[in-house]
Image (cartoon, rainbow, N blue to C red):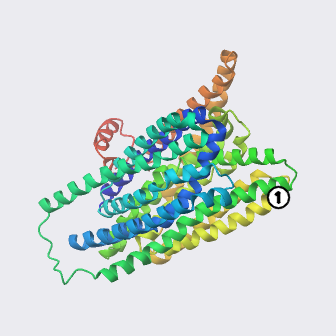
Amino acid sequence: MSGRRFLQGALILSIAGIIVKILGALYKIPLVRLIGDEGMGLYAMVYPIFSTLLVLSTAGIPIAISILVSEKQSKNDDKGAKKIFLISFTMLAILGLLFTLLLVFNARWIAVYVINEPRVFYGLIAIAPAIFISSIISAFRGYFQGNQTMTPTALSQVIEQSVRVVTILVLAYIFLPRGIEFSVAGATFGAVTGGLAALSVLIVAYILFRKKQRNNKPASPTTIHDIEATNSLTKRIATLAFPVTIAGLVVPIMQWIDVIIIPSRLRYIGYSGSEAAAFFGQFAAANVLINLAPIITISIALSLVPAISEAITKNKIEDARHRINLAMWMTFLIGLPASAGLFILATPITTMLYDIPEIGKILAILAPSALILGLYQTTRGALQGLGKTYLPAINLTIGIIIKGVLTYILVGIPELGIIGAGIATVTGLTVSVLLNYYHLKKHTGFKMSWKRNVTIPFVCTALMTALVFLTYGAAMAILTPLTLTIAPLSNILSTLIAIKIGILVYILSLLLLGNVKIQDLEAIPKVGPRIVKFLSRFKIFKA
């Protein structure tokens, strides 16, 4: 796959990810007004159980599909790729059905004895079928990603979230008169209707894709004797998928550990139960903003898996190194300014969005995570593309253990408190990234292009940060006397102005220093050539 096609895949998934995240954030505003804090509490209690069972049911198989299908297609083995999909589809359907039934038959016990909230039972029952549906969806998405065709995945994600949001709000409203627990169950059923909508899109896309392949491809030279045995393929799928499953479980488990450790350690240093809960809520709110930045980098990572797998299969190690460098450049290009912006505008942003300025100090500590999380996703995608799926799992586990130990120690220090949880998060993630980077160098001989990937984006980010700081201060000085009757307005306008100035300065400085080249812009689907034509008039970037 060319660098252009890799960028196209990453961009398509990024746009879909942004739309999905926006929809996912906006619907919570009317939902809170509809079912209140108590209802949102019940709603939130359902998802850790659902997420854990979903990780177990998909078992990392979509990544395995992506790797193996890419490998087969690089050899023009269309029959082999189709066989991998069918085997994986069967495995996922069986696992999805088993975990759906497991949740259905144990929902009452989980609600009463695990979550300690019997009313969650209805929500668990309502969301259970989504495990089976999501498992099947993941088979199709893994197949398309292995074929380096990202549009069906992106389209299905947007439609899934759109249908889900509508269902959540409509059913929550319809069932509210019957009781808050039934309203919550109606809301959680949105995962089922959204999943069915996405599955319908993917089935149609698969039929059309296979028809196009038959029409455009000459008959594969592969004979029945050349096709890899089912037992062998099943073993390879399981071998690739198992470490991904372990890695996928680490994060949900750590979320549960955070819930246990942070409030208890805050109470240990003298905070009341309500104060500890409030601090934990602030920590969670800061993490929501941190997780917005890696939307694009997770798309880069998903596109990187089949790209690296294809290069390795063809024994083109230099191509693999080039694609890793390209992905790392994109990650630094996005992550550095995101981290700096969240740090310098931490309090203005949290005041604007939450009207809780205290969250700002937590966000400032967590800000480096926007870059570090992106680097983890990118290095993980590269290692998975190499077939070393167990390494990111091991490295993340080590980082999470360090995070857990440090959280326990640092949050228990009165001078740090909840800030200690932020320090622990950044430290744990950093360790995981450094371990991934070490293994990338070891297995590929990869060498970072430090000047392009890090130095120039860092200089541009430093310039951006200085101007953002000055712009915000100047805007506040000018706008505050003018907006006395609407106190928050000066902060909102100043923050938005500073962000826009920061983005403009960052992009222009990248172009002037030659960090973004003509071929990078041309690789952007459809609009790339137009951007190049426009900017060529000003002669501000290098070829």
Q: State the image coordinates of residue 435 (x, y, percent, origin top left).
A: 57, 71
Q: Residue at x 48, y 50 (%)?
A: 295
Q: Is any part of residue 354 visible from this angle? A: yes
Q: State the image coordinates of residue 473 (x, y, percent, origin top left).
A: 67, 30
**Residue at the farthest right position:** 270
Q: Is residue 355 left or right of residue 202?
A: right
Q: Work out whether residue 443 or residue 70 is closer to the camera in this orientation and state it.
A: 70
When the figure is inspected, residue 426 is found, relative to residue 446, above or below; the finding is above
Q: Residue at x 70, y 36 (%)?
A: 356
* Image quarter of the N terminus: bottom left
Question: Could you say whether the residue bearing mark 1 is in a helix, strand or loop?
Answer: loop
Q: How many marks?
A: 1
Q: Amino acid at mark 1?
A: Gly
| Mark 1 Cα shell of 10 Å, populated few (<14), some (14-19), many (≥20) | many
Q: Residue at x 31, y 55 (%)?
A: 4
When the figure is inspected, residue 436 is found, relative to residue 207, above or below; the finding is below
When the figure is inspected, residue 423 is found, relative to residue 87, above or below; the finding is above
Q: Work out whether residue 151 or residue 345 is closer to the camera in this orientation and state it.
A: 151
Q: Is any part of residue 426 visible from this angle? A: no
Q: Quadrant of residue 15?
A: top left
Residue receiving disc 1: 412
Q: State the image coordinates of residue 489 (x, y, percent, origin top left).
A: 63, 23
